[in-house]
Image (cartoon, rainbow, N blue to C red):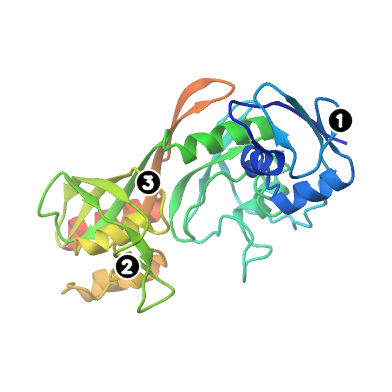
Amino acid sequence: MPRLEIVLPEGARRIDHLLATLLAERGLTRSALHRLMGEGRVLLDGLPVKPSNAARSGQKVVVDLPEPEPSGLVPMEHPLTVLYEDEACVAVEKPAGLVTHPAKGHAHDTLVNVLVGKAIGMAAGFGPARPGILHRLDKETSGVLLLAKNDAAHADLAAQFKDRQIEKTYWALVWGALERDPSEVDAPIGRDPRNRKRMAVVSGGRPARTSFRTLEVLPHVSLVEARPFTGRTHQIRVHLSSLRHPVVGDALYGGHPENGLPSSFLRSRVRAAGRFFLHARSLTFMSPAAGRVTVTSPLPEEFETIIEEFRRHG
């Protein structure tokens, strides 16, 4: 049975509240901790505790964790490119069209299932269906995805994501050209009240900030670099749509191939790609095993191809 030992940080709080905060990255809820305490598997300075017991800084907590349950994940055969790996983490290339982890409608055809098929050892992460997962990319977004290989690395890297210490860069092919370049959007994002499948810039949403700069202007479109400073759902897509420069091929946010294209050839090429053109270009983080690391992902072939098509046929 795995055992976790913690020396409590400063501040006096109820033991269940404190441990729920400290162990959130392991997926241990207050109710789960209550069960462990009821079974005598949580000790404070060597003595069993109740959820309401007070805890002070410097006290030692020992938690006997339950053995992880089998995930039931089905291996999936699919090519996988490893961009970086050390003892703590691995960064892989997520192709467009592949969901990051199992969810409704995608039980066995996700990147996690591919990792299981490759027998790459992952941390317990946020639950049995999401081993090693620290962040996610939308199904049609390609590029760098970082995963943790052990629980200590997962806690460290998850804290870096939470504290916005990880630098993320995306490349997007967008309609038109930015009026202000570089530019920044600082606008809250929440569920679109008119379409619950979408996110939108809404009053009272969660704070969200993204910077943009143009890399290349082509006929009808531009290649843009995006740097998100927060991590809201669909953030880059929503902010680009709010600028009236949606991602090419992103029908949900106004980037449908018919928008503003006089060429039926280009319309057919965008449709044939079967994706929208957003790519997670790079991640910079502090690996617990190797220090500061930057991982860069090359543009996929279909992304390079559509750029060249606009150059030639615009």
Indicate the quadrant where residue 311 lies.
Answer: bottom left
Q: Percent from the top left, x then y, of residue 226?
A: 29, 46
Check the picture and name the quadrant holding the N terminus. Answer: top right
Q: Position of residue 75 (x, y in %)?
A: 73, 54
x then y, percent, for residue 104: 62, 69
The three-letter amino acid code for the residue at tag 2 is Val
Marks 1/2 in contact by CB < 8 Å: the verdict is: no
Q: Where is mark 3, residue-wise?
A: 230
* Disc 2 and disc 3 in contact, CB within 8 angstroms: no
* CA distance separating discs 2 and 3: 29 Å
Q: Position of residue 297 (x, y in %)?
A: 42, 40
Q: Identify the element where label 3 is drawn.
A: loop
Q: Which residue is mark 1?
A: 47
Mark 2 packing: few (<14 Cα in 10 Å), some, or many (20+)? Answer: many
Q: Residue at x 38, y 78 (%)?
A: 195
* Closer to the eye: label 2 or 3: 3
Residue type for callout 1: Leu
Between 184 and 237, the one lying in front of the other is 184
The front one of 158 and 299 is: 158
Vertical side of 248 occupied by 48: above or below: above
Q: CA distance from mark 3 to mark 1?
A: 42 Å
- Mark carried by residue 270: 2
User: What's the amino acid at mark 3?
Assistant: Thr
Q: Nearer the viewer, residue 185 or 182?
A: 185
